[in-house]
Amino acid sequence: MNKKVTYLIVGQGLAGTWLSYYLSQQEISFVIVNSASQAAASKVASGVINPVTGRRIVQTWIIEEVLPFSVAAYNSMQEMLNTTLIQKTPVVLIHPSEQMKESFEYRLHHDNVYLQTIHEEISLSNFNTPFGTGMIDSCYWIDLNKMLSQWKQLQIEKENYITDDFELNDVTITNENVCWKNITANKIIFCDGVNAFNNPYFNTLPFAPNKGEALIVEIKNLSPHFIYKSNITIVPWKADLFWVGSNYEWDFDNLHPSESFKQKMIEALNQLLTFPYEIKDHLVGLRPANKERRPFVGYHPIYKNVGIINGLGTKGCSLAPFFAAQLMAHDLNGAPIHPEASLSRFNELLSKNSLS
Ligand SMILES: Cc1cc2nc3c(=O)[nH]c(=O)nc-3n(C[C@H](O)[C@H](O)[C@H](O)COP(=O)(O)OP(=O)(O)OC[C@H]3O[C@@H](n4cnc5c(N)ncnc54)[C@H](O)[C@@H]3O)c2cc1C
């Protein structure tokens, strides 16, 4: 049976989930096509929203706006799905070196919004802390796997979801509409993560995929109410399981879990913890990153019904709801997309790419 919708969304990671969420809030029709075989960064991500970053512990890009917006978004999504998706989970910093301790202490007293000293009631007796500790407040943990699977289930029930591999050969795009198999849509939005890097509509964008790995480790008796960050990060995952990672590889020749990463994590865990632990799994993903470290949000300058939400890099949890909402507001009432994220900054580059 043929189906007519306003939006066809390719991909249901964080970007596709949040775009379809805002469409459903506005009662605008859509279909999501998501592949069962293509990898999703959102499924291996630790799900952390952390407002500070780097060795200098500075605030992340536009976090003052993005943090309250995203926290409210996850709260409304969890209310709609009648489950728990977001938890305030402070980051306990276990300084890995004298230099990081000094960085923390400097930042604690200069332009500080999110850093604190550790409360006395947090027990770190099972950690080695030779360089001292600190804390980042206003951090959140999102249960991404629960969110993705429950949203998928709801959209299957509403007949808004197709499990399939979207291929450009199967689609006809004209100024009037987009026809893919038995679906006719007004617009198509690519939310397909690193797969977009090969999409002829967008492959001239400065994409730079980044490989990241994590171990899933069982650690009994470790409080799941905190994220622990040293030269590795330990994040609550489920029950006694913790996510341990990660690395940021710009040069890689395969997507396999690497023995060198595993050994590095074991060494770091042995240094950090006096708890016993057991490795249960080893995950790998590709972050849809780019050279500018800014998202790509908006429409192609020539093919005006072909859009994208991509380039979420290491910050998909906070940026996806924020920029999906901006794309929605842009479509509904012409509101501007943040100039550093708007695809229009690449109009000249994308205009040269006529696909003819
Ligand atoms: C190890 C690791 C840890 C991370 N930790 C964090 C973190 O703690 N916090 C944070 O904010 N971010 C984190 N990230 C980054 C985060 O995962 C990404 O920013 C985010 O998931 C990107 O979402 P996306 O929807 O753009 O892409 P994806 O999650 O990759 O989703 C793309 C979707 O498109 C589908 N798809 C692709 N091609 C096709 C096709 N041809 N047809 C149909 N469907 C298709 C895929 O199956 C997938 O479901 C981490 C990433 C990694 C790798």
Image: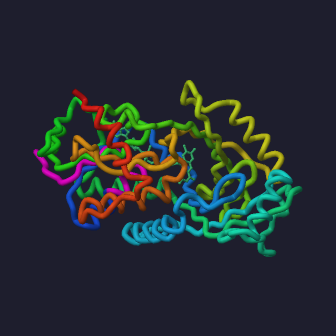
Observer-nearest of 117 and 53: 53
x and y, in percent, of residue 177 in the image: 14, 45
**Of the pair 39 and 16, the residue shown nearer to us:** 16
- Residue for point 47% across, 57% down: 319
Q: Left or right: 352 with respect to 278?
A: left
Q: Residue 39 location, x and y as percent?
A: 45, 38
The span shown in magenta is 1-19
Among the 4 quarters of the image, the one containing residue 81: bottom left
- Towards the viewer: 155 or 321: 321
The residue under the point 42% across, 61% down is 322
| Residue 202 appears in the rendering | yes
Q: From this viewpoint, which residue is outermost toward the right?
A: 130
Using the image as rendered, state which of residue 96 and residue 311 is in the foreground.
311
- Residue that lies at the very extreme toward the front in this rendered image: 348
Assess whether residue 186 is covered by the magenta stretch.
Answer: no
Question: Does residue 162 appear in the picture of this structure?
Answer: no
**Which image quarter holds the N terminus?**
top left
Residue 77 figure quarter: bottom left
Q: Name the residue located 51 percent from the left edge and 59 percent from the top edge.
A: 143
Indicate the position of residue 349 as horizontal and vertical percent values. Answer: 35, 37
How many marks do you count on the picture? 0
Quadrant of the snapshot with the C terminus: top left
